[in-house]
Amino acid sequence: MPSMLNIVFAPQIVFAPQALHRALVIKLRHHGDVLLAAPVISTLKRFAPQCDVDALVYADTAPMLEYLPALAQLHCVDRDWKRKGVLAQSAAEWRLLSALRARRYDLVIHLSVHTRGAWLTRLLKPRWSVAPQRPDAQKFWQGSFSHFYAAQSHADRHTVDTNLDSLRTLGLTPTHADQTVTLNPGTAAETRIDRVMTEHGLTTQGFIHLHPASRWGFKCWPAERVGALCDALAARGWPLVLTSAPDAKEKALIAEVRKATQVSMIDLSGQLTLKELAALTARAKLFVGVDSAPMHIAAAMGTPVVAIFGPSGDREWGPWQVQSRIVTSLTHTCRPCGRAGCNDSKISECLTSLPVSQVLAACEALL
């Protein structure tokens, strides 16, 4: 449980969950961040079952929350709006604001320090509003919300638990069960993966899923070492499935991995949606990857995870509530530094020097 020092109460505005009719949870971040915010929605719905709980996320991250039973409506900000010109963007923003205003929210929970959340809260005028405390906060931020909680500040607390501080500051006490992260791929994704499995002769629990890529190159393990790991796993008789996002850099990494090994692998890089990725990884015996959204998706699907961490913090961002092994450098005491590679060079020595034997040992422990 977090220390009460991590939570800032605003007792002058007493929160009453029984008075809630509609609430909005805002998480304008990346895919993994949005997925790890799902327990806030589910837990709020448990405390206020009569309340419609909506969410506002970026459009590309919407699959992380679709089909969440506790969610009433999902509103989206499209990152492409700004590329369509000022008039088109303004019209889209106005439609979003109008849709949000029509919901007449009693509570807004803003789960990041994004300034948009402060503006929206002022425009929506809920009775209660929650946001992270900002050390650099000016009067505008401070005056936008009724309640505050401490932003992530302790390396020994997971992001899921920190997100739930937004409810603790309202006087609600989440249980251990409330911290569960789940993802429902949906029927269409399940059906597509059933076909893929049949096409490639795969059986449930009969293959290893590797997703070595990330949009952040400094989080990735070198391709030649991933290839050597593939050699070792294939030698033990495991069919291997490789995936990545459609991004050119991620697909290039997969191509380098394939060059570094002679074993036969099923390459689905760039071919799966996020929901299909979830349906695939749910059927795997083991997931192996780096600090990225697919790692969080695998954990949410209950698949054992080997997670390779470099400069990012594994205690804040590691696999959540699933059988797992976290592999980090044993010699680089400087990690986690939180930087984009050593001295922001985009190259992380704690990863480039990480031996194959260490990752293989983690895999064998779970296999």
Image: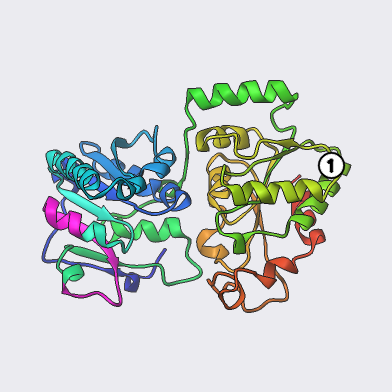
Locate the N terminus by quadrant.
Answer: bottom left
Numbered disc 1: secondary structure: helix
- Residue beneath the point at 25% across and 74% down: 137
Q: Nearer the viewer, residue 343 or 109?
A: 343
User: Is residue 107 among the parts visible in the rendering?
Assistant: yes
Q: Where is residue 128 in the image (x, y as percent from the top left)?
A: 16, 55
Residue drawn at x 59%, y 47% as measured from the top left: 248
Badge 1: few (under 14), some or many (20 or more) residues near its Cα, within 10 Å? some
- Total residue callouts: 1
Q: What residue type is labelled 1?
A: Ala
- Residue 348 spot, x, y in % from top left: 65, 70
Whether 167 is drawn above or below 6: the answer is above
Q: Give the range drawn in magenta.
A: 119-139
Residue 127 visible to an observer of this rendering: no
Residue 178 highlighted magenta (yes or no): no
Relative image position of residue 297 (x, y in whole percent) = 54, 44
Left or right: residue 22 compared with residue 313? left
In this view of the protein, which residue sits in the foreground, 5 or 25?
25
Q: Residue at x 13, y 57 (%)?
A: 122
- Left of 275 or right of it: where is 264? right
Residue 159 lies left or right of residue 169; in this view the side is right
Is residue 204 positioned above or below 232 on the image?
Answer: above
Can you say which quadrant of the picture contains the C terminus? top right
Residue 222, given in percent of the width and then of the height, sits at: 72, 60
Q: Name the colouring of the figure.
A: rainbow
Q: In which quarter of the image is residue 138?
A: bottom left
Residue 128 part of the magenta segment = yes
Q: Name the residue carrying label 1.
A: 234
Residue 361 image-quadrant placement: bottom right
In the image, is 229 to the left or to the right of 220? Answer: right
